[in-house]
Image (tube, grey):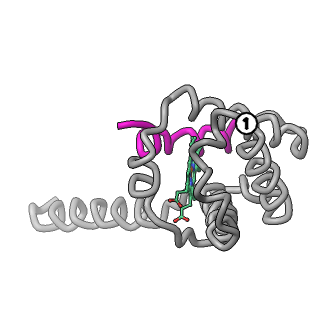
């Protein structure tokens, strides 16, 4: 086989490899559907906000927010969008960055863990599949570095 033909074969194998890797799609993410879609996420968000209001330690962080009904409604809607988009749903989060909102609050990691504990309990009341609950919790927990501290 001539060098020219070898070169053509090597070129085409490389090209085929490149094309096939470009066409490799990630498996579609069903978490949003598994969670019950927007209806469930809205119920979960409202119950989560109630639990933040009722907790003596956590509610301190939210005093200003919960005294302003418009800001509370925006917060609620931003949370729904964030939960929806983090679970692979069709919403777009349009709120401020997590760092910008939370860093001035100097949130302690125990307080962050408490919010996760409440969220998990609430999810368990709506969703029977523990794997689904854990998958969602892992995504929310991944926000911790931008929420806790400094
Ligand atoms: C657990 C994960 C958390 C998520 C997903 C989350 C998400 C959000 C979102 C989406 C907003 C609204 C941003 C906006 O409207 O532009 C927000 C605001 C806020 N978050 Fe969080 N948050 C979390 C944890 C916490 C914790 C642990 C605390 C305190 C204990 C906290 C305190 C606040 C407060 C006080 C605001 C309102 C700030 C303001 O409007 O000035 N968050 N959060």
Residue 67 figure quarter: bottom right
| Residue in front for this viewpoint, 90 or 104 | 104
Give me the residue at 80% from left, 61% from top.
42
Give me the residue at 58% from left, 72% from top.
92
Q: Position of residue 68 (x, y in %)?
A: 65, 66
Query: Compared with residue 138, is residue 3 higher up or lower down, i.e. above or below?
Result: below
Q: Position of residue 128 (x, y in %)?
A: 90, 39
Callout 1: CB less than 8 Å from ligand 1: no
Label 1 sits on residue:
55
Q: Which residues are magenta?
A: 134-150
Q: Is residue 28 visible?
A: no
Query: Compared with residue 56, is residue 29 higher up or lower down, i.e. above or below?
Result: below
Q: Quadrant of the C terminus?
A: top left
Q: Is residue 120 visible?
A: yes
| Residue in front for this viewpoint, 5 or 127 | 127
Give me the residue at 82% from left, 41% from top.
122
Q: Position of residue 143 (x, y in %)?
A: 50, 45
């Amino acid at each position: 086989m001539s060098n020219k033909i070898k070169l053509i074969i090597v070129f085409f194998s490389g090209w085929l490899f490149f094309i096939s890797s470009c066409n490799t799609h990630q498996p579609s993410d069903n978490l949003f559907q598994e969670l019950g879609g927007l209806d469930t996420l809205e119920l979960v968000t409202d119950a989560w906000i109630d639990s933040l209001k009722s907790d003596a330690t956590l509610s301190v962080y939210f005093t200003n927010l919960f005294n302003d009904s418009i800001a509370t409604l925006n917060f609620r809607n931003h949370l729904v969008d964030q939960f929806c988009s983090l679970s692979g749903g069709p919403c777009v989060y349009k709120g401020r960055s997590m760092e910008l909102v939370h860093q001035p609050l100097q949130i302690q990691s125990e307080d962050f863990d408490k919010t996760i504990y409440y969220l998990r309990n609430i999810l368990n009341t709506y969703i029977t599949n523990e794997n689904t609950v854990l998958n969602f919790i892992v995504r929310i927990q991944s926000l911790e570095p931008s929420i806790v501290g400094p």
